[in-house]
Amino acid sequence: MAASGSPGRLRVATGIVVAAAIATTLLPARGDEAGGKGANAGVRIGLVFDVGGRGDKSFNDAAWEGISRAARELGVTTEILEPSGAEDREAAMRLFGARGFDLVFGVGFIFSTDVNVVARAFPATRFACIDYSPPMVGEIPPNVSGLTFREEEGSFLVGAVAGLLSKTKHVGFVGGMDIPLIHKFEAGYRAGALEVCPTCEVHVAYAGTTPDAFRDPVKGKALAVSQITAGADVLYHASGTTGHGVFEAAHDMGAKAIGVDSDQYDEMPGTVATSMIKRGDVAVFDTVKSVLEGHFRGGLASFGLAEDAVGYVSEGPHGSAIPADVKARVAALRERVVQKEIRIPVK
Amino acid sequence: MSAVFSLTMVAETLRISAPYACAAAGGVWAERSGVIQIGLEGVLLTSAFTSVAVAHATGSAALGVVAGVIAGAAISVGHGLLVEKARVDAVVSGIALNLSAMAGTRLALRGLYGSASNSPAIEGFRFGPTGSAGWSLLARVFADPVTLLAIAAVVATPFVLARTRLGLRVRAAGENPVAAAAVGVDVTRVRLSALAISGAVCALGGVHLAFDQHRFESGMSNGRGFIALAAVVVSGWRAGRAAMACLAFGALEALQIVLQDQARKGSLGDLVQLLPYVATLLVLAFAAGRSAAPKGLGKPAEE
């Protein structure tokens, strides 16, 4: 056997490779101090992102914006953690709990189970979870506030926009993972489109049944191609980065697209007609405020059109693709939803 | 049914299959030379990212393609060096390659563009007519330089392996490295060359993924390297069959998408989504036992 193949060297080389591989998975972990010299500096707020959440220029960054605003305007001390692996989510929340923080946020429905477990372990700390989905069995711990959005209301408005913009009377919806949270978007959108265009056909497709369905743009493009081929000329997506494939297809095939969660105009200018907006920053800021003012309550808290926490892009250059009469019609619908004259289905 | 047998369907099948087929062809190149390569996923990701980063920095789509291919070849050769020279277990090295690619591209995304999810958009190639007609979709597929390169590489692979002197040496190194060495073949060198080709061919799949979206997205290979690896095994390490398996998988995925719209009106939506995976399982079940791995696969160049 040649010298290069001696078992000792083999073991050393294997060890180095394994160590290097493990090290790279740990690299992006980090914590940030966002502020803490204000009037309420004694009140400490922690926020935990999901893996790869921070910097998504969308939903997660909105939560970050909310907590930054709280630090700026309310003078609380804030700290942010982003775990490097899925198994560290709970550990990150525990870390804040163990340090006696006043309020800890988990950003995303994926925290729903972790937050219940950690909240029971640290009854003195208050917890809030954005896009919370309540447990199947048992109760929500008293120190957990589950923040939910009435996405169906915002989706209803962009559904109406789609129904009014469509020339073919076919509109499309591309969902990410096939779960109740995304069904809310679909149901609201469908109701909105049919409200203004009862003869419209709504095409629906989902990218998959696992969380990977939220990051498969190749699949998103294929789903959109299929819907546009079937006649759809306005497509709405609720599918994370899978939606970029929807924009690509709409651009190539001359259709219009509607973004989700944040203003997605810049993803494909000229193709993205508007976006359904979910104001995670409003939910985070309001929750911090409720702690300071002493009226934080456990249980479910719901944010919708009435709280200005959902809506759609209609102002400025990014909303210029929508004609004035469409805007007026949708504004009237919005008012009727806020006044509870229209009930919007959630599935 | 007209939606099933249409030019749109052909165009979509080709577009969806391209990354799978490139990765599978790359897998055949590596494994026929005797080197186990489970790092195809990492090669896809690395080349996708590199092509976009270079295209974005230089403004040249062509340079992006070249850089992506070089990056793919380079890390594939790196895997070869670890396995052949340092005698690292090929499975360990492959896992390390995948993990480093996953974390490395994410880190670079953050460092270069300050985003956890995606790079800025690149110009890339946008040739061919716009429009929603089937023929215009097909025209766009055949006007896309990356797709053409991918098709060329996938089609050339079985011919080069079967008909050329290089192909013969690669197969000899994979079947019986000791005998190959005895007749004067430098097995290590042949394997490293095969890995360079493997990485370059697989990289075309990664570049295709990124250029199809005109940007890089974190984790955008989404397990395609592993499905390609399955195609390699199912096809018995034969390049032509592996390409056909990938084409079939792409066609099933395209079919699943067309049927989903129809089936959603009933209650079959979930079942239809399972189609490609059920088909894969069936193929695996029938092909099991008939797969013939290269006899020297995983065996060192010298005893």
Image (cartoon, rainbow, N blue to C red):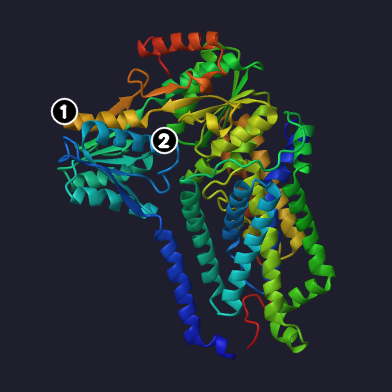
In the image, B185 versus A72, the foreground residue is A72
Kindly identify which numbered label has been placed on residue A293.
Answer: 1
Q: Position of residue A266 (x, y in %)?
A: 54, 32
Element type at mark 2: helix
The answer as to whether the residues below labels 2 and 1 share one chain is: yes
Query: What amino acid type is highlighted by mark number 1?
Result: Glu
- Residue A22 to residue A318: above or below: below
Q: To which chain does the residue with label 1 belong?
A: A
Residue at image coords 77%, 59%:
B240
Quadrant location of the N terminus of chain A? bottom right
Residue at image coords 17%, 31%:
A292
- Residue A278 to residue B170: above or below: above
Q: Position of residue B56 (x, y in %)?
A: 60, 46
- Residue B237 to residue A61: above or below: below
In the image, A292 versus A35, the foreground residue is A35
Q: To which chain does the residue with label 2 belong?
A: A
Q: Quadrant of residue B21?
A: bottom right
The reply to whether residue A207 is visible in this rendering is no
Residue at image mark 2: A59
Residue at image coords 45%, 36%:
A179
- Residue B282 to residue A281: above or below: below
Q: How far apart are the two marked residues, 2 and 1, measured between alpha carbons?
A: 26 Å
Query: What amino acid type is highlighted by mark number 2?
Result: Phe
Q: Quadrant of residue A57?
A: top left
